[in-house]
Amino acid sequence: MTTADGEPIASITDATLADIAANGMWRGGGFDLNPSVLAVARALLAAVQGVAPAGTLPEELRELVARVLRQAGVTFPRIAVTEEIGLSAFAIKQQGPEPRPVVIMPAGWNAYGWLPFMAGYLTLAARGYHVLAYTPRGLGDPELPYTSDGFIDIAGPEDWSDGSKVITFAQEHFAPGRIGMMGLSYGSGISQLVAAHDPEDRVDAVVALSTWGNLATSLLHHDTRHTRAVQALIDFTGDDEDKKFDEKTRAILDDFRQGRNLQSVVDWGTVRSPETYVELTNTRGIPTMFSSTWHESLFPPGEAIDAFEKLTVPKYLNLWIGDHGAPEGAGITGVVGGAAFPGLLKPMKEAYDWLDHHLLEAANGVPDWPTVNSQVMFGYETAPVIGGSRRITVPARREPLASWAEATVRTEAWYLSGTGDDGDGTLSDKPSTGWAREFTAGHETNATAMDDIMTTGQKEWFGNPKNYDTGDFQETRLLLWFTEGLTGGRRIRGSATLRLTARTDEADAVTLVAYLLDVAPDDSAQIITHEPCTVTGLTPGTERTVNWTLQPAAYDLPDGHRLALVVNSRDRLYAFTGKENSTTVLGSPVGEEALLELPLG
């Protein structure tokens, strides 16, 4: 027996679900889906179609399917949005005459369109919703039935228009009482943008998971291009680039890769940014839930937080440990019980609760939630498991806040010094001036934000953050500064800022990447935050003062640990601007002393 895409229907065992629960939904350093996720999705699809062999699903998923089929019917419409373009869709319609709300779910960015989140659709249907999932235009492998026609618009105006036509289809097909939109990743941005632009203002609630607020700053921030994230997206559309994007979009992508016409790239991204239309959302009063992760590698959390803070509607922001889609992955792809660690399913439960309150009028405590729930990085308790990794036994605590601005109570100044006795600089409470330190630019080092996009941060969510050895850092290619062991530790809450001067004698531009690390007494280290900055228009041999803000963080530095600052010139996530093997010189002149301002809560 095979599925609609020709793949065999695999039996889903406890081991299949345990794989998702313990390893997440991504594999291979990008948007490659865990095969277990696809196996579960295909088996669930076959089950609702009535073609799954007996014993394909474990009891909990079998009962979920049976419950949905007792109360609802399933169809596979193709929604025409133009004469030439139809969108692949999956619909669950509740039986009975009474109006029920519908949840519309634009698919995430992947080659399988709406398929991977079958468990999420069935969970919503079991809670009493009509469900309409669809693949946004152009996305998906053209050989698969989950693919939509047209070119990918990357959450542009054509996607907004398509979303409104999907809403119209939902009204005609379901006659819903209320309309919600929920998406993860690509679908989260489209959900926000459709809700803000729908001509008839028909969306009553939004859930935007692993979302973005400003696509322009996700692509380009501090004049540094986020090249690895963009390439990961391009690589997983389902077909070759020239078949997935129209000529105008390909020109934008090429300009981005080549580092030219970047203002046009920024303008293009700004059009696709929910933050640009925050006043539309506010005027419409659309209750909106966001989630993001501290080491989000596609849409850095700072820009999502900035957009969220501008909302004046009923709103809720979850900030989780991990990377893109990791917190929500298990719950939306099929893990319904037997969680690998306490709290694994909390992210999706809260998403469903948000919809239940705003669409079903459930008295479930949502109005009493804090505006922001911030999970403190790596504050979980773990135990070893076979194979050398660890599992969470007690989840990291979450701190309630009335706004993210409340997280930072004060800042603490740490001044960068010149070279100490051991060859490294120090961070101290007294200014240090007149020094210059240099390194060779243009090379990746062992000081890196992550080994693999999405997968390194996914391991953080499951209790296995990356460990660094500062002794292995290539000191000719970076610079290091350390505090002494800090009595009482530090509650780092917010965005650190960094100021220093830079010069190069051989180029007119430099890229600098700053990392903050927590260094334990045994010299092992974990990352707190990082951020790149590119300085252009330099006159060779002339100093330029550089100021930039690192990504926000919530991190408890333990008693006796040291804080380390690393600055290098190249990270695999970002474009390098400058001259390879040139010398970058950092310094601290009088009046503009090199300074790290640490946010404390």
Image: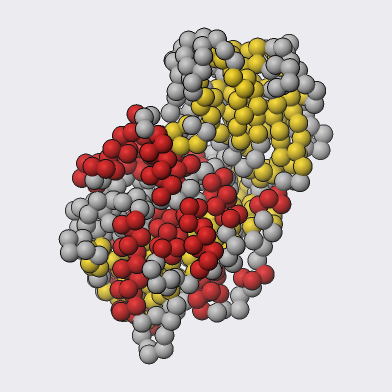
Q: Relative to residue 286, is residue 219 depicted above or below?
A: above
Which corner quadrant of the image does residue 255 belong to? top left
**Residue for point 59% across, 67% down:** 314
Towards the viewer: 179 or 68? 179
Work out which residue is located at the far bottom of the displayed protein and give it. 97
Q: Is residue 29 left or right of residue 537?
A: left
Q: Residue furthest right?
A: 487
Residue 424 in the figure: left or right of residue 115: right
Image mark count = 0
Residue 464, image x and y in percent? 56, 42
Which quarter shows the N terminus?
A: bottom left
Q: Nearer the viewer, residue 482 or 242?
A: 242
Task: Give the x, y percent position of residue 475.
Answer: 58, 15
Residue 49 in sight: yes
> Residue 76 at what x, y percent from top left?
25, 70
Q: Measured along the vertical axis of the image, is residue 318 above or below residue 237? A: below
Report x, y in % for residue 579: 44, 15
Q: Is 563 displayed left or right of 358 in the figure?
A: right
Compared with 417, 192 (above or below) is below
Task: Name the residue nearer the viewer: 519 or 425.
Answer: 425
**Residue 583 in sight:** no
